Image (cartoon, rainbow, N blue to C red):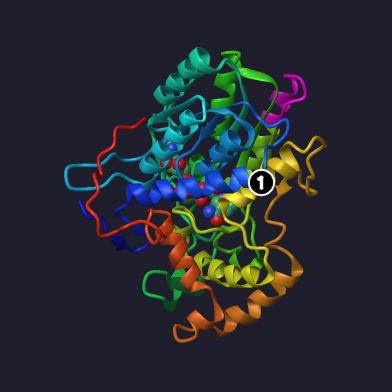
Amino acid sequence: MVIKPRIRGFVCITAHPAGCAAHVQEQIDLVKSRGPIKNGPKNVLVIGSSTGFGLSSRITAAFGSGANTLGIFFERPSEEDRPATAGWYNTNAFTAAARKAGLFAANINGDAFSDEVKRQAIEVIKRDMGQVDLVVYSLASPRRTHPRTGTVHKSCLKPIGTTYTNKTVDTDTGRVSDITIEGASETEVADTIAVMGGEDWEMWMQLLEENNLIAPGASSVAYSYIGPELTWPVYKNGTIGMAKIDLERAAKRIDAMLKTHGYGRAFISVNKALVTQASSAIPVVPLYISIIYKLMKAKGTHEGCIEQIQRLFATQMYNGSALDFDDQGRVRIDDWEMREEIQSQVAPIWSQITTENLAELTDIAGYQKEFLKLFGFGIAGIDYDADIDPHQELL
Ligand code: NAD
């Protein structure tokens, strides 16, 4: 099959196996080039491990710290005339490389919110890993079937209270327009918290504890975002922001639980705004990302998911001293994004942007390139006209 990108709105419905493998290899090479992470984790569970920050966490743990990893994700295999999703190919590329390096790597493809997937994970950890010393919680999901009630909760990305209007960009066509988003109802807020809040993270940690699978001194981290005031109505003060507050609540409870396991810790890392499958679905934010990409590249401070997570592990989590928390007890690897020298330039650029000057004022080209790369496209050295077998058994 010859596989080309097929973009539908903010998703690409095809993925290229060789391109995804090259993208994973790039990340492995980056981590290796930065050298070993001393005292890093050795047995790691990554929930949401196939793309974005979760994949980068898994790669950093394995290739920076020689960790055995169990990855949990929800991806679609290939069908007769359709390639698999990018996360499927990413996982196989990672797993092959990790095993080649002599590392244990196991995968569970299924709904992380379900009791069944949790039970399978417990089995694998008991049988093959002993205890875990790091749990990374990096899910981004549009829905959750609650394992106790059976209710299907759907998350949404909306402001709360009032209707919000701002600029947004169609990242496929480069058209800038105004978008108006209705304020969320109370039910929508509650549903988004049920999906993207902390309850499921707590369920995972509780189950691990009940099964005595948490190593003394273990850490657990989940990822959040804050960003500038410009995006607050749709992010920090919107439905997703309320879910992130709940994630912080869960972090405190899990932290207290891990403290009973010999100085363990759970915390939130606030990460940079980056092109991922999850962030491309958020209105307004992709336009902001295109601006900061340009500004941060000019300053030499631009990072992708892998640079972010490698820095989190090497300079914060495993640097031999205490974590550097903000006043709310969160680790901030969005620090370079939030610098005054960057943020002071965003609003003046924002107010001027139109479809006509988008390419000049922002790094929309960089955004589009990164977006395609998420699906294995636009990578040097890959022959996209060649016939390639899209079918792969999950390793
Ligand atoms: P992503 O879409 O790249 O990754 C999501 C992962 O979750 C994938 O591995 C997917 O397979 C998995 N997943 C989704 N539903 C699942 C389910 N039901 N069961 C099992 N696995 C499931 O997203 P991302 O951008 O890397 O987001 C990860 C976390 O980082 C989120 O909490 C997000 O809010 C946070 N974050 C993202 C950004 C950003 O700009 N992208 C910035 C800061 C924080």
Q: Residue furthest front?
A: 381
Q: How many marks?
A: 1
Q: Residue at x 69, y 52 (%)?
A: 333
Beta carbon at label 1 within 8 Å of ligand 1? no
Quadrant of the rendering where the C terminus is positioned: top left
* Position in image of residue 82 (x %, y %): 22, 48
Q: Which residue type does callout 1 highlight?
A: Arg
Q: Is residue 175 above or below residue 56?
A: below
- Nearer the observer, 294 or 243: 294
* Position in image of residue 44 (x %, y %): 58, 28
**Residue 242 visible in the displayed image:** no
Horizontal side of 75 relative to 168 (left or right) equals left
Q: Residue at x 64, y 77 (%)?
A: 347
Q: Magenta stretch containing residue 57, yes or no?
A: no
Q: Quadrant of residue 211?
A: top right
* Position in image of residue 372 (x %, y %): 40, 60
- Nearer the observer, 330 or 377: 377
Q: Residue at x 48, y 66 (%)?
A: 367
Q: Residue at x 43, y 60 (%)?
A: 371
- Nearer the observer, 326 or 197: 326
Q: Is residue 118 above or below residue 51?
A: above
Q: Is residue 282 above or below residue 263?
A: below
Q: Which residues are magenta?
A: 254-265
**Residue 150 visible in the displayed image:** yes
Q: Which residue is mark 1?
A: 34
Q: In the structure shown, which secondary structural element does the residue marked by tag 1 occupy?
A: loop
* Position in image of residue 106 (x %, y %): 45, 26
Q: Is residue 124 above or below residue 231?
A: above
Q: Residue furthest left?
A: 80
- Nearer the observer, 199 or 287: 287
The crowding category of the residue bearing disc 1, from other C-alpha atoms within 10 Å (few below 14, some 14 to 19, many at least 20), is: few
Q: Residue furthest right?
A: 321
